[in-house]
Image (cartoon, rainbow, N blue to C red):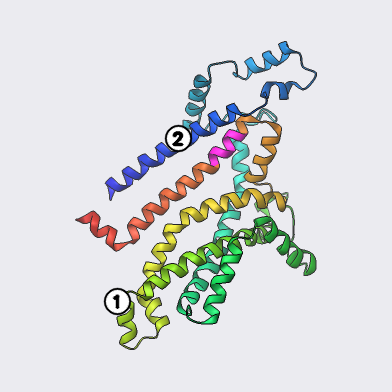
């Protein structure tokens, strides 16, 4: 097991290194001059060159990359070109909104996808099971913007149950208001991700129903539902855990869109603003942080799967 963890940890470090290189060099080949943007249209070539030198943009690009990576090792992402604030501090503040949003979205997705996926598998030969599967197929293809607008129209404007935009100025000092402001955005992401998770769960449950141990349990007197829940559900959950890495990536991408729609001060909305401002250090920091979260979740899922799956534990011990 230790060997497995070390291998996965090395792959994680390699993935972060490759991601840092892709992010850094891709941003450097995009059109536009950061120094010119900062200097404005009235800046002279000499002034633009002075700005470029002060930012270190005149140095060799590989030297710039090495300096940035060495800063990452110290959790130093540089300073914003617009505000002058350390990028790490601004990202930490935005993550206090984005991470709870992603967690709440995941809870909604699991609450929707797992029960309905099991029901759809058990009733796969009936109209209700087929209806659930078709509905999940349709929901998985719905753009997050459309789902958000629909939820705003129903629960925010028509019923007036929940706030439709913004986040408390005091943040989590008002936990009740903060959670209420995240419910609709989290539902927007969670419903779509839940539909995707439902399909994974249904497929795994159908496979489990066909296994000998589930059919034997049903033959000795258990109903199909009890046989699946008692004997097949652990294997179903292993498949669900395996899909969580992809689900988290979907949650992060969804957060970028949903934070704009609901005017939430999270890292996704900040990324859109930073791209418009050509704030290169912040754009680098934003994208690298989101990428690191996805890779770290994938690493945690791999370890959890190895620990939970008895077959893999047997392989390790042998």
Task: Name the magenta segment's main secondary structure.
Answer: helix
Q: Is residue 13 toward the left or the right of residue 150 in the image?
A: left
Residue denoted by label 2: 18
Q: Which mark is residue 239?
A: none
Residue 177 makes an appearance in the image: no
Q: Quadrant of residue 270?
A: top right
Q: Which residues are magenta?
A: 283-289
Magenta residue check for 43: no
* Relative height, residue 110 to residue 316 (above, below): below
Q: Quadrant of the C terminus?
A: bottom left
Residue drawn at 27 percent across, 62 percent down: 311
Q: Nearer the viewer, residue 76 or 227?
A: 227
Residue denoted by label 1: 212
**Residue furthest to the top:** 46
* Relative height, residue 194 to residue 208 (above, below): above
Q: Nearer the viewer, residue 80 or 140?
A: 140
**Percent from the top left, x then y, of residue 6?**
32, 43
Residue 22 makes an appearance in the image: yes
* Relative height, residue 278 to residue 160 (above, below): above
Q: CA distance from mark 1 to mark 2?
A: 44 Å
**Percent from the top left, x then y, of residue 267?**
63, 44
Earlier residue among tags 1 and 2: 2
**Percent from the top left, x then y, of residue 24?**
54, 30
Q: Quadrant of residue 52?
A: top right
Magenta residue check for 284: yes
Check contact, mark 1 vs mark 2: CB within 8 A.
no
Q: Nearer the viewer, residue 70 or 248?
A: 248
Badge 1 element: helix
């Amino acid at each position: 097991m230790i060997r497995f963890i070390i291998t996965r940890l090395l792959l994680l470090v390699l993935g972060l290194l490759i991601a840092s290189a892709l992010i850094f060099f891709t941003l450097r080949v995009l059109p536009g001059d950061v120094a010119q943007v900062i200097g404005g249209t009235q800046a002279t070539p000499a002034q633009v060159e002075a700005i470029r030198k002060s930012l270190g943009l005149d140095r060799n690009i590989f030297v710039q990359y090495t300096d940035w990576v060495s800063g990452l090792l110290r959790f130093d992402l540089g300073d914003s070109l617009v505000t002058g604030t350390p990028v790490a501090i601004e990202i930490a503040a935005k993550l206090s909104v984005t991470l709870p949003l992603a967690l709440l979205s995941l809870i909604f997705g699991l609450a929707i996808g797992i029960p309905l996926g099991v029901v759809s598998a058990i009733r796969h030969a009936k109209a209700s099971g087929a209806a659930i599967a078709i509905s999940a197929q349709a929901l998985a293809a719905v753009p997050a913007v459309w789902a958000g607008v629909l939820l705003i129209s129903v629960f925010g404007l028509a019923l007036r149950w929940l706030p439709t935009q913004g986040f408390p100025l005091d943040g989590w000092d008002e936990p009740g208001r903060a959670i209420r402001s995240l419910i609709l955005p989290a539902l927007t992401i969670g419903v779509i991700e839940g539909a995707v998770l439902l399909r994974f769960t249904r497929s795994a449950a159908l496979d489990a129903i066909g296994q000998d141990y589930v059919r034997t349990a049903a033959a000795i007197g258990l109903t199909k539902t009890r046989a699946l829940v008692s004997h097949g559900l652990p294997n179903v959950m292993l498949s669900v855990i395996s899909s969580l890495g992809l689900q988290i990536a979907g949650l992060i991408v969804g957060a970028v869109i949903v934070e704009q729609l609901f005017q939430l001060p999270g890292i996704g909305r900040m990324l859109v603003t930073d791209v418009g401002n050509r704030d290169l250090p912040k754009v680098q920091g934003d994208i690298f942080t989101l990428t690191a979260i996805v890779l770290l979740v994938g690493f945690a899922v791999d370890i959890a799967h190895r620990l939970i799956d008895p077959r893999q534990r047997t392989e390790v011990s042998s």
